[in-house]
Each structure stands twice: as C-alpha cells, then as structure tokens.
Amino acid sequence: MLDALINFVSEVLELLGGVSDLTVKSIRSLRDIKKIPGPLLEQMNNFGVNSVPIVLFTSVFTGMVTAIQIAYQIRDYAPLDLLGAGVAKMVMMELGPVLTALVIAGRMGAGIAAELGTMRVTEQIDALECMAIDPIRYLVLPRILSGIIMVPILTVLAITVAITGAAFVSNVVVDLDYTTFFQGIKLYFVPKDLYGGLIKSIFFGLIVSLMGSYYGYYAKGGATGVGKATTQAVVSSSLLILLMDYVLGVFLFGK
Amino acid sequence: MIEIRDIRKRLGDKEVLKGISLTINEGETVAILGRSGMGKSVLLKHIVGLMKPDSGQVIVDGVDITRVKRKKLFEIRRLFGFVFQNSALFDSFTVWKNVALPLIEAGYDIETIDMRVKKVLSMVNLEGTEDLYPAELSGGMMKRVGIARALVGDPKYLLYDEPTAGLDPVIADRINDQILYLKEYLKKTAVVVTHDLRSALKISDKIALLTDGVIVTFIRKEEIFQVEHPEMRQFLKASGLS
C-alpha cells in the first residue's frame, strides 16, 4: 500500500517536472519565433481546420439536446421565452468550451502524441538534433501555439453551431419561434459568459497540445511505447480539462 | 580531430561504456566493430552530443562538447553529418525536403538549396527521386538518402551507424562502395559503427573492437590478422577470413 502510494506520488512529481521542463524549453525557443510561422500554419491546418467536421457534429447535437432538456426542465416553472438564454449561457460558459476541448483531446492530443512518439522511436527527433535544428522549436512549439490559437476558434464555432441547432430544435420540437428564442439570448446576454468560456478554451488548448507533446516527445519503447503515450496523452488531457474547468469556473464565475 | 577520453556511461543497471578512449585523426575513417548490444551506437551518439557521458570528455576540434552550452553544441553539430541505422528520414517529407531541411533551417536561398540537394543526390546516384516519399523507397535507397542528407551541409565529419545493417549483400556492398567513394572523393573524416568485418575492412583505415563496453584493440586494418584477442578471432572466423 505504502509502495503504491510512493510510486503514485513519484509518478505525479515526475510528470509535473517533465511538463514544466518542456514548457520552459518551449518558452525559451520563442527566441527563434521568426522560424515558426511555416510549421505553425501547418499545425493549425492539421489540428484545427481538419477538426472542424467533428466539432460541428458534436456541437450541433449538443445544442439540440440541451434545448430539449432545458425546455423539459423549465416547462412547469418558467416561461419558455427563457429557453434561448438558458441554452446560450450553458453553451457559452460550459458545454461549448468543455466538449470542444474533450473532442480535440481525442483527436489533436492523440495525433500529436502519436506523431511525435513515432518520430522519437524512429530517431527522427535525434536526426533533427544532429542537423542542429532545435526539435522543441521545430516540433513542440508550433503544436502548443496551434492548440492555444485553434481551440478557442473552434470553440466559437462550436458555440455558434450549438445555438443554431438549439434554435432549430426549439422551433420544430418545442414550438418556440426563432424571434423569441434569439430575443431571450439578447435580453440575458452578459459578455463575461462568452469571454469566460473563451478563457477556458485557451487553457484547454494549452493542456491538450502540451500533454500530447509531452507524452509523444518523451515516448520510448517502439510501437507499444507510442500506443501507451497516445493513451496517456488523451486520458491526462481529459482529466486535466475537467479539473481546470472547475478551477476556472470558480475563478471566473464563482462570485 | 575527435578525441574521446575515458568516457563512461550507465543506462539503467548496465554500464554500457566502461572508460572508452579513442582518437580519430583528420582524414581517417575509423570503424568501430562489435557485436550487437556492445554500446557501439551509444558511443557514436556521444561523439555528436546526442548523449552525455557520466564521466569523461569528448573533444571535437579542441572543444569538450560534454561541457558546452546548447548553442555552442549546435555550432559543433554543424561539423557533423550523421547517417542513422534506420535512416531516420522524415516520413511526411519528400526526398527533396528531407535532404534540404538543414539548409532550409539555416536560411539559405531556394536556388542554392536546390542546387546543393541535386548535387548530393547525384553523389549517391539518386537523381530524379526528389519528389518521392520515404515509403516509396527501397531500404538501400533510404540509406543513400540518409547519406545525402548527412552530406548536404558539407560537414567535416561523417558518422555512420550500421550503414549496411538490414540490407542484402549486394545492396550492402553498393553502400560500402558509396562510402568508399565519398572517403576518396571528399576526403572526409569518418566514424563507422558496424558489426560487419568485411565492410569495416573495405571502407576504413583503422578498426577499433568494442567488447563489453571496452575497446580491446585499436589497429590499422592491415594489422587485423595479427590480433590475438578471441573476439577478433571470432569475427575473422565468422566472416570467413581465417
């Protein structure tokens, strides 16, 4: 029991140390920022633009089911005019950022870990070192920056699509006209709801890309090691997203 | 000149290098011979600073690379071309971009890069393969692209990690011819890690035998038949040379 606890604590400390070290090295490599735009655009396309379909699919159904469930819950207590406001607040503050981040953790986090892990075990990262190319600057930094930039953009897209889906379902299933739905949103809109959600998404983007990069960059042990790194990246990103969601929720909306 | 002074390296529970000392003079090709798992590749990675020894020094042109900062280490690395055992080509890049990458990152203009890439590809007889991806190449071609990539920055030192491993004897011999041609044509200093004695005899000037983390003999290749060490006798016998 004691051994297991000691192992767990040492693994957590090792993870914290490793992630902090990678973060510091990434920040240092910002000195060569003029060489970053090419790889950054490539990563923004790989992990951002190519994630649009799955984000659209997730968010439209999230919006629709949120509308139906809020309508079901408030039916006996409050006017349905509030439905739009309820959906918008739920989607902007919580569902948009969190679900987008979890979907991206599965796609982008796994992709980064698998790609960097394969490069590590096939000595491609060593090859970069031998060519005097800093692998952190060339591989890791563009991925981290693309996560920080693309996840908020995808979150805005997800929020928009989710609200559109909710409006459609409210009209077709709940029989609430579009004007009333959108007036409800307008009436109760607080900018903090939106930017709070976007602040969350910046942190989530950092978590997903950093954890994917960390597990991939330090992968070892051939194909098995790459598979393990990929799983660890997705699991740890997902857990940290939920943890960070709570911390930021308290910080942003707690008072 | 590369001087390795009493380096030791432990990986996990095993001491892989137990006080290695070796000097590689300019213009020489030195083969480091040894069975699999004896620490040959680990030694090669120390020479280019990919690994740091637990103790000892690696001195390249008078600079101890085990003690320099990363920026200086990158400067020193520009003196090296490294040919990896499994080529280590970037699978998402074409042959052209694989070879050109060090020059692109160094900021050369596109005409110079293209001219240089075509020149080194022709040196390894791979003209016309610029647009192919690594997955479309044979094992021998991948090795030669690896050699072209190592040559493109016009390095002073060439390091080969098992250049003929995993190739059939005919292709392996062609790679040996290629290395020999580069040695005679470009007069580069080279270190070749290999477990293939025939290959070592063909391409090197000197042979160091690495066994259990120690260099047990370091001789000119002409002296190989006088070596009495049982490991070398085994290599000679297994290669059909005694």
Image (spheres, helix red, strand yellow):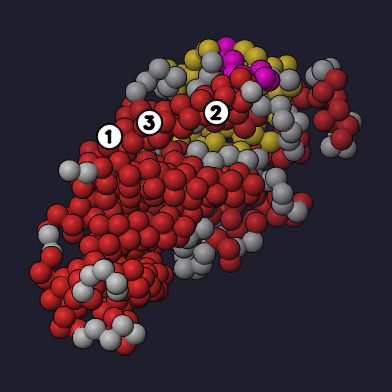
- Magenta: main secondary structure: strand
Tag 3 secondary structure: helix
Residue located 28% across and 53% down the image: A201
Residue B50 is left or right of residue A224, and the answer is left
Q: Which residues are magenta?
A: B5-15
Q: Amino acid at mark 3?
A: Asp
Residue A8: numbered disc: 2
Residue B174 x %, y %: 67, 52
Q: Chain of mark 1?
A: A
Q: How far, Cα to Cα, is label 2 from label 3? A: 20 Å
Q: How far, Cα to Cα, is label 1 from label 2? A: 30 Å
Q: Which residue is mark 3?
A: A21
In depth, the one of B198 and A241 nearer the eye is A241
**1 and 2 marks in contact (CB < 8 Å):** no
Q: Chain of mark 2?
A: A
Magenta-span inclusion, residue A244 = no
